Amino acid sequence: MDLFNTMKTYFKSLVLAGACVLSASPVQAQAEPVKKLTLTILSVDISGFRAEPQQMGNLVRTELEKLDTFDVMDRYDVAYMVDKNKLNINNCYGKLCLTEIGEVIRSDKMLSGTVELYPKSVIYTLRLIDVKTKTVEKTTVMEFLNLPDELQAFTNVIVRSMFNRPVDKALLDKLTQRNGFDNAINNPKKERLRLDGPRLGFVAYTGNTAHILQSDKTVGGFEAFPLMFQFGYQFEKQYLNEGKIQALFEFLPMITGVDQGYFIPSFTLLHGLRSNVNGWEFALGPTVNLSPKAHGYYDQGNVWHRESDWTNDPAHEGVKNPFAIRERLDSRGDYALQSGFVLAFGRTFRSGKLNLPVNVYVIPGREGFRAGASLGFNAKNK
């Protein structure tokens, strides 16, 4: 009986000890963080810029710390270790020099590189060196546009690319695409991409306006086809050009109808938004043109007469005109301003430095709407 009680007590002790070990294991494993590899940056060789190699090294170090991939040695710790071990780090950018210093300061990885400015581009190179194997583990080379003020953006892009982190495609295009749509990054302190230039196109008239244009001149018509050629010039002023969008005002003086012997001047003021990514554009605003108008009336047969036709007819002497007087487009009338509102859409196509804006528009109206299309061209302004 004593033997049985002794074995029972011993078994309970074993179970309790096992439970304690199992319950303690996750806590113990959880308490031990994963150790990161140490990485050290001394400096980055740079030529053609105002920045110093040490400043470039600090810039790369900052972008690396954002990734939280390595245990990046602080620049003050680097300075301390260099001074303590009396190391000469001047012009230390090669594999042999970096691995020797890495062994002294006990760093797992060393990172260095070069930034070189050329007339039309910036060549940025980064090299990751494994100290233990004394080999270049990875090299990343990127070519950017000649944008001296965008060193930090260059560094952000190349560091993220080197360590397979997602890169903002819109930012990458602005920094690397020579013939991309202009914006405040890839064309700094210079004239932005503008679409000032000639415009050629046509306008189609509908409704009662089309009927008047085709009518005989004896009844106030124009004996014209309701599809007329237009030409003019677009001036524009951009007041916002950031990110993917630019906002602008557009001024368009135009001449219509010269193909049919008419001279119809117009002026349009548009407020628009244009995409820096693909060139799509939307704009709206008022338009005014000079056209001949007359006061008159429609009789019971829906025939148009000028107001003077009633008063000058002896048969109507002393008789008040029973028909409503209105103003209408009339080739026999006097020129007057006519206003409207334009809704326009378009897209700019590019061929090298040549810009080809294509636009369509519509102008609603009580007598019928107008719709048209235009094509322009210009070269990239600098």
Image: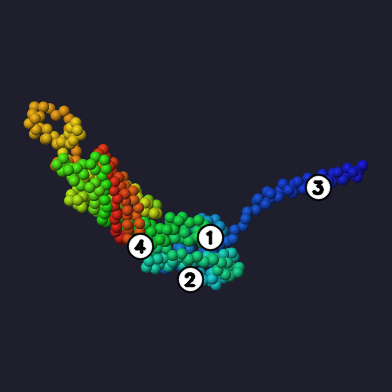
Q: Which residue lies under the disc numbered 1?
A: 163
Amino acid carrying label 4: it is: Gly
Amino acid carrying label 1: it is: Phe
Task: Report, in whole angstroms, how far the alpha carbon at label 4 lies from the one at label 3.
Answer: 81 Å
Q: Is 180 displayed left or right of 198 in the figure? A: right
Q: Nearer the viewer, mark 3 or mark 1?
A: 1
Marks 2 and 3, the one that precedes in the sequence: 3
Marks 1 and 4, the one that precedes in the sequence: 1
Q: Is 55 displayed left or right of 255 in the figure? A: right
Mark 4 element type? loop
In depth, the one of 258 and 194 nearer the eye is: 258
Q: Nearer the viewer, mark 1 or mark 2?
A: 1
Q: Is 146 displayed left or right of 22 in the figure? A: left
Q: Which residue lies under the disc numbered 2?
A: 91
Q: Is residue 164 above or below residue 114?
A: above
Task: Report, in whole angstroms, how far the alpha carbon at label 2 lies from the one at label 3.
Answer: 65 Å
Tell me what residue is drawn at x 30 percent, y 60 percent.
379
Q: x, y percentage for residue 195?
A: 30, 55
Residue 8: which quarter of the image? top right
Amino acid carrying label 2: it is: Asn
Q: Is residue 251 above or below residue 45?
A: above
Q: Which residue lies under the disc numbered 4?
A: 352
Mark 2 element type? loop
Q: Which residue lies under the disc numbered 3?
A: 14
How packed mark 2 is, by other alpha carbons closer than 10 Å (few <14, some 14-19, many 20 or more), is: few
How packed mark 1 is, by other alpha carbons closer than 10 Å (few <14, some 14-19, many 20 or more), is: few
